[in-house]
Amino acid sequence: MAGYSSGRRTGSHGMPSPLARDSHVTRPESLIESRYQPLRKLGDGILGDVFLVHDRMMGDTVALKQLNSQYQGNPSAVKQLSVEMAALQRILHPSIVRFIEKNACPWNHFFTMEYLEGAPLSQTDRSYLRALGNSLPISITVLEALAALHGIGIVHRDVKLGNVMLSGTQGGTGAKLFDFGTAYVPGEYDSASHGAVGTLEFLPPECQVIMAKADPRADLYSWGIAMYEMMAGNMPFYSMNIQELMDMHRNIVPTPLHLTYPHIPATVSAIVSRALEKEPGNRFQSALEMKDAILQCMGPMGF
């Protein structure tokens, strides 16, 4: 599990910072190492770092997510890590990373989850993702995961290629959604009360404000960006200037994919364009509706 911070991520806790000074094997600070043997650092999240560890008690190799040392005493950060744990505890789905256990020690906040071997889609070969025979089945898998989340009121709020792991061989169907660090979970602390959350390149127009209402259709917009990126090999909106990038999300309509990339059928292009509608009411109204639209396209294409 790597690539935890692809894109410019925004949130109420500031920039992620590595725990470690050793670039090869980073040891979690204050970890109760009588149980967990640190093996290596896997990646950085908005709140903390993720490590590959051996659980001596269970005999398994798992991923451990721990708050960065600078956030261990930060009440908002502790609450947000609790939200991530709550999201994973409420869902068990084959296309979502599996929660294992949370730490009970109040002075050291971490939890464990399954270790996903493979690479995030953001680090997957671009030619592999451009092939519709790969990108469309991956999209169906992600939309099934989102449908399961939305069905219990959870909104991921940071859907992007960097948060989908392609496990095992590329020929498999092992795409899994992970990193719920900015998720909305009913009844839990909401980090959006302090500012916009998510990754700027994937941030829907309606989510650019404080106290933005958590809406499942925002996740569909973000996955529309991801589909565009997979099929085109580049982002529909890009600027080094943050305000300019946010203005693009609000005001610029991307050229339909099939007009620029001949290998993309107009029917597939229309799905991406609808997902990227500025007004949520003009998008697909559910992940299952978007999934069904993709399935209808795939039949005539022979997939």
Image (spheres, helix red, strand yellow):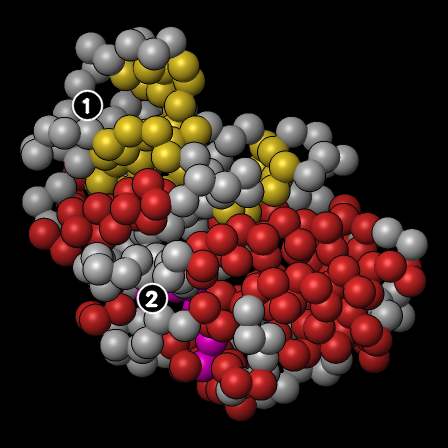
**Can the viewer see residue 74?**
yes
Residue 39 higher or lower than 166, as above or below: above
In the picture, the disc for residue 31 is 1
Residue 43, magenta (yes or no): no
Is residue 235 at all visible to an observer of this figure? Answer: no
Q: Quadrant of residue 207?
A: bottom left
Look at label 2 and name its amino acid. Val
Residue 219 position within the rendered picture, expressed as x and y whole percent measured from the top left: 49, 66
Picture residue at 54% right of the left edge, 38% below the top: 94
Task: Say which mark, if any, is on residue 98.
Answer: none
**Residue 198: x %, y % from top left:** 39, 64
Q: Residue furthest front?
A: 151
Q: Amino acid at mark 1?
A: Leu
Comparing 274 with 74, the one in front is 274
Judge by depth and name the residue closer to the eye, 17 or 286.
286
Please name the residue shown 24% across and 32% down the image. Answer: 102
Q: Residues within 10 Å of mark 1 (few under 14, many from 20)?
A: some
Q: Which residues are magenta?
A: 197-205
Is residue 206 depicted above or below 103 in this figure? below
Residue under circle 2? 197
The secondary structure type at the circle numbered 2 is: loop
